[in-house]
Amino acid sequence: MSKESATKNDAAASPLVQNLKQQKAAKTGTRSTVLPNTGVNVTWPEFRSHGEWMKAQRHAKNDVTKATNFYLVSVCSFAGEQMTITDFLELIPSGDILHLTAEVIGDGVEDEDEESLGNRLH
């Protein structure tokens, strides 16, 4: 057995890796939102690998705004269909894109008041 194979086997057997695999398996469902302007139902997997974000960054040549858009079209289903980046940018209004970005990529903070948000930022 090569040293690389042994290292991979050790990593696969580690409690940390097993715990992370269990957490991933527990997030096999989907989440969804309805876009406020167009009324389109959008779904995406509960668990999304970091590899999808890296792929979006490569397509966008590390432009964060473009990467976000590539990421959204790669992980989301729009009324059960995949969209091209061109259709997404031409047909989905900016308010819906901002809403979707917050839902999919947001930090999970729900409607905080300004004071508590300000305290977190400082």
Image (cartoon, helix red, strand yellow):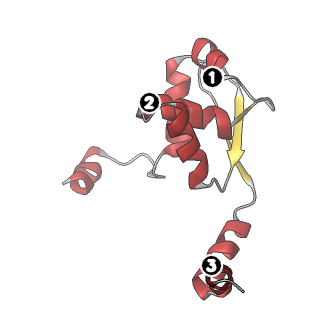
Q: Amino acid at mark 1?
A: Ile
Quarter of the image for the C terminus: give it: bottom left
In-image side of 119 versus 67 (left or right):
left
Whole-percent x, y for residue 105 in the image: 51, 44
Name the residue rendered at 71%, 40% in the picture: 43
Hey, what amino acid is under mark 3? Glu
Q: Secondary structure at mark 3?
A: helix
Query: Residue 74: horizontal and vertical position, in percent?
Result: 66, 36
| SS for callout 1 | helix
Which residue of the protein is positioned furthest toward the right in this rendering? 80
Residue marked by disc 1: 85
* Mark 1 to mark 2 CA distance (whole Å): 13 Å
Q: Are marks 1 and 2 in contact (CB under 8 Å)?
A: no
Kindly tell me whether residue 90 is visible in this rendering.
Answer: yes
Asked if residue 19 is positioned above or below residue 66 in the image, the reply reads below
- For the residues marked 2 and 3, what is the alpha-carbon distance in whole angstroms? 38 Å
Left or right of 55 on screen, residue 98: left
For label 3, count other residues whose C-alpha is less than 10 Å away and answer few (under 14), some (14-19) or many (20+). few
Per the image, label 2 sits on a secondary structure element best described as helix
- Which numbered tag is attached to residue 4? 3
Closest to the observer, 107 or 7:
7
Query: Residue 38 in the image: x percent, y percent?
Result: 65, 19
Residue at x-position 58% and y-position 82%: 16
Check the image and report above or below for 43 versus 4. Answer: above
Q: Which mark is residue 65?
A: 2
Q: Give the residue at x 72% y 86%.
A: 1
